[in-house]
Amino acid sequence: MASQFSTNGAAVPANATASSINDIPKSWTFTSKLPSDSLFPTPADSHKTPRDQIRPRQVREALFTWVRPQTIEKPELLAISPAAMRDLGIREGDEKTEDFINTVAGNKLQGWDEQKLEGGYPWAQCYGGFQFGQWAGQLGDGRAISLFETTNQTTDIRYELQLKGAGLTPYSRFADGKAVLRSSIREFVVSEALNALGIPTTRALSLTLLPGVKVRRETSEPGAIVARFAQSWLRIGNFDILRARGDRDLIRKLATYIAEDVFDGWETLPGRLDDPDKPDESARTKYNIDSDEIEGPDESAENRFTRLYREIVRRNALTVAKWQAYGFMNGVLNTDNTSLFGLSIDFGPFAFMDNFNPSYTPNHDDHMLRYSYRNQPSIIWWNLVRLGESLGELIGAGSQVDDPRFVEDGVKEEEAPGIIARAEKIIMQIGEEYKAVFLGEYKKLMTARLGLKNCKDGDFEELFSGVLDTMETLELDFNLFFRRLGSVKVGKLATEQERQEKAGFFFYSDGVTGLGGEAEGRKRVGEWLGKWRQRILEDWGDGQTVSDEQERERMQAMKKVNPNFIPRSWILDEVLKRVEKNDERDVLDRIMHMVLHPFEDSWAGRTFEGKEYKGDKDEETRWTSDVPRIGRAMQCSCSS
């Protein structure tokens, strides 16, 4: 399969090869190459078992359990993502068919022969995890059931389609296997929003309401299912559980599967840097390295499993840099919520930043602020160290990793100190690489968001840190600031007075709510605008002026990277109430249209992909204007 992060908003052509959900190509590679739960050694064994007898329990020496979704009476398809339909190669209009609706509700098993009791069959993964820093034991897909894999015939990207809220599995623990409409709407929308912003993420195909199904959380809520998909649903927790149980054979088998079947082969993985201790000074990363090649001196000899670890680390560094640049917070960055493919995954109490506060966490249960905006880069690294510990024996083995004695018998006592020292050294070196990749990507994105062509040495402190400090002190809106900055003409900022007058453009309509009041706010923003103006003149002009054409080009470039619309918490809260309480449905299509086209100035009355879009101008204006004071920095719970 192709190992791209995602299509990241790049639409597959509408006239590309597309089929019904019945006819898109399907595979079950994951279940064909990895060991299943011994209680149900075949799909038929699971299928013949009454559904209510497949209940939570401990599963060992397996990576998944065969389990079918619980059937649903009269499912109501609420919405689909047109972009997801294209990326999966499903033709437009197929969502109106009974087969599509029953597939995404879990009632129709694609690829399974009911008469012969054979064919492809759904499954749920086994994994563990560290939650809020503490080992939580076996977790797994407690309400998510994967249906099949499908490869888009145009892009050659393989995705795994999964239903969230599809019923009990052996991994449900004390839960009910269900999902509520509230969290389902949130995941459905944010998955597609992140992809449209260019942030690696799992995706959402459809949202289905389960009429008559009530789910008990803090209150009784409507049940729902999200059909979601990803290049891989594997996460650090898959290795956590194997390490906790000492299952070294499965660790090796899973690592090999990921390299060969998720990342397209060992030769696609990045090799050792010229100087691993100084990643900023090393030449470009090397690829096309044979699987059995050993790189570097003996004390830090890197084998293919080190290259696999480096690939996972680099992917996550890039993704968390994008989160920081766009003010996105996952809210629950446990190891079971950290993707091996480097995707944003498992959306619970997530949020986009409103007024900038680096200590903000959208999770009201996160009293220690472990998963706050400020901490996300360090927490992802903490999680990746746990992965390094799971792979530590393979990494530390160096050149002996394929020695038959090591493979069969493991580490002898006298060998342990050397293997531990080598693994620790390599993990620390790759940690430096994580920092370098993260900072490089973050600087690139912030440079673009500020409308600059190049990042100079002083930009990080003077412009990046300067604007964030100002936003925090004055409680300015993070994403609105960048979008509004893109419409500011530097020719109107020649004097300090002009800059201070323009400063009010970045304030909420209810004024400066942070420290110092409006006068101090205008002074601070004005000072920063002066520094920004000078850098724009240097990058786009001759250092003294910019032409009208250069100004228009710069403003257009900024519009392409600074969204006009993001699905903020208060908007999602409003949409939920309108769908649940008022039985509105069209509002889901409208918010999905906006998240799929986040950089537009407007939507209603315009043509998209050859079709006129009606929309709702008043709604669009509200959703792209100031955040209502009561809706800023909202928090929600993990319950979903």
Image (tube, helix red, strand yellow):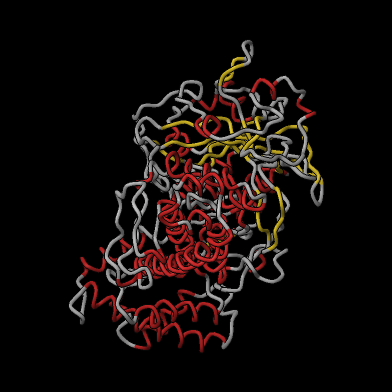
Q: Is residue 481 above or below residue 457?
A: above
Which one is nearer the viewer's eye here, 634 or 40? 40
Left or right, 305 with respect to 279, comes to right
Residue 213 appears left or right of 466: right
Residue at 79% over, 28% down: 52
- Please say whether residue 187 is visible from this viewpoint: yes
Q: List x then y, in percent, for residue 309.
A: 46, 55
Most foreground residue, 538 or 380: 380
Q: Nearer the viewer, residue 105 or 604?
A: 105
Residue 76 lies, in percent from the top left, at 66, 30
Residue that extends furthest to the front in the rendered view of this protein: 414
Instruction: Work out whether residue 601 can be spotted.
Output: no
Q: Is residue 495 left or right of residue 233?
A: left
The answer to which of 165 and 619 lies nearer the viewer is: 165
Q: Quadrant of residue 97?
A: top right
> Looking at the image, how many numbered discs can be counted on the residues?
0
The image shows residue 346, relative to residue 466, as above or below, that is above
Residue 277 placed where, x, y %? 38, 72
**Considering only vertical position in the picture, is 276 above or below 20?**
below
The N terminus: image quadrant: top left
Where residue 72 appears, as percent x and y from the top left, is 71, 27
What's the residue at 57%, 70% (across, down)? 375
In the image, what residue occupies the spot 50% across and 62% down?
A: 419
* Extreme residue toward the left, this view: 542
Q: Say left or right for 409 vs 266.
A: right
